[in-house]
Image: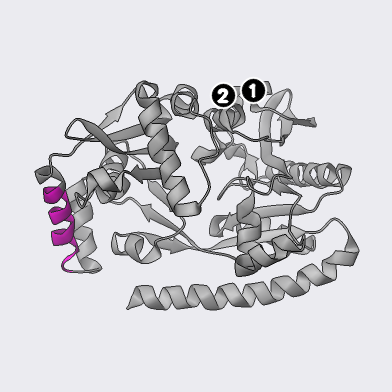
Amino acid sequence: MYTVETVDSVTLLNKDEWDAIGDSPLSSYGWLRTVEETYTGSIDRRYIVVKNRQKIVGGAICSIAREKDKFAYVDSELLGRLKKFTAKVGVSFLPALVCGCTGEHLLIEKGLKDTKEHVIIKDLILDAIVDEAGKHRLPICFPYLRDNEQNLMDILKQKGFSHTPVAPYLYIDIEWTSFEEYLNSLRGISKKIKQSFTKEIRINEREGVKIESVKEPGKYADRLYDLINNHYLKHSGVPFKFKKEFIAKVQEYTGQDCTFYIAWKNDFITATSFVLRKNSTLYVCITAVDRELAGKDMTFFIMSFHRPMIDAITHGIKRIDKGLGMIEMKTRRGCKVGNQFFFYKPSNKLSDIAIKLWFVFLSKYYQKKNALSSKNISK
């Protein structure tokens, strides 16, 4: 009845069937194809696909992670400040078979939830992941599992995976019918927050900034790419890992589920941002601002928070995923904090004991760190 196959490109799959089993914008066919075609390094993908009568009913997005720069977040989360030292002595949690995208690791047809078929498909996917890792003698890593994946986390614990909490993520569940309602709701956080937001908007308008969504970002590819690349160089010390064609391709392959914003000031493009949508979720991917041209015109806040919120309410979006970082600033703007976890299983039993001991230490470290962040937020 069920068949399982592994393919190395999303282009070998039926687009409509694949998109029907996932919810995250980062698991969409269009986004995955964009990554495959425009990433500057190698993407050694392994798509685990479960079919029922030739129709896709389940799957998982996996990668054979050998390039440490592409999957640098794995060592960053699991080694922290020790990463620079351990890199010199050759200690790393890579290579590994890295499975899933943020917040969505097993993709299963929606109508099968809470059925026996759902359990069968889940088992088939996990077995295929174990087989693929065994074939290459690789550890298995499930990064950034979230609270909504508790069942999967319970299964992985039973299978002997080491696990630890990591940095939390931020999100906003939309309960309002207008931007004004959203602003009014923030009074529960601070009586001055609405006044602060209104001031940001007035400053932006007074500075003559015009923000628009563009249907063909490829026309401005050179400038938009420079903005994004400079943003990565400034904040992470590495260039943007995609080719310039990324700008046009992501719009072409994701269609109406992608929106690029451009900020104009004195006839110059001073900033850009883009968001991805799928079903009821909007994911804010990046906001890149030319600080020298923008000055203190508040464009970053308008493009990162105000404009996505207005468009999300307009399109009936239920959740905005704000990703990692800037916790205090985001919570002041109505974001909630969600828990995230890493699960890891080495390829041999000899290293399993050392890994488990390290994860016990790491878990205590993150629990203390996250608790301190929560305390600072509540002040």
Q: Residue at x 33, y 23 (%)?
A: 215
Pinpoint residue 220: horizontal percent, then vertical percent: 35, 25
Q: Amino acid at mark 1?
A: Thr
Relative to 12, say whether 172 is above or below.
below
- Say if the magenta span includes residue 105: no
Residue 223 appears left or right of 205 = right
- Say if the magenta span includes residue 195: yes
Residue 221 appears left or right of 361 = left
Residue in the foreground of this view, choosing between 264 and 276: 264
Residue in the foreground of this view, choosing between 82 and 94: 82
Mark 2 nearby-residue class (10 Å; few <14, some 14–19, many ≥20):
few
Pinpoint residue 105: horizontal percent, then vertical percent: 63, 47
Residue 198 appears left or right of 9 = left
Q: Which residue is the site of mark 1?
A: 11
Q: Residue at x 36, y 41 (%)?
A: 317
Residue 114 appears left or right of 44 = left
Pinpoint residue 4: horizontal percent, then vertical percent: 79, 33
Q: How many numbered discs sit on the rendered protein?
A: 2
Residue 344 showing in the rendered view: yes
First-in-chain label (1 vs 2): 1
Q: Quadrant of residue 213?
A: top left
Q: Quadrant of residue 275?
A: top left
Q: Amino acid at mark 2?
A: Asp
Residue span colored magenta: 191-203
Residue in the foreground of this view, choosing between 340 and 362: 362
Considering the whole magenta stretch, tell me its main secondary structure.
Answer: helix
Q: Which residue is the site of mark 2?
A: 16
* Gap in angstroms between the C-alphas marked 1 and 2: 12 Å
Residue in the foreground of this view, choosing between 38 and 372: 38
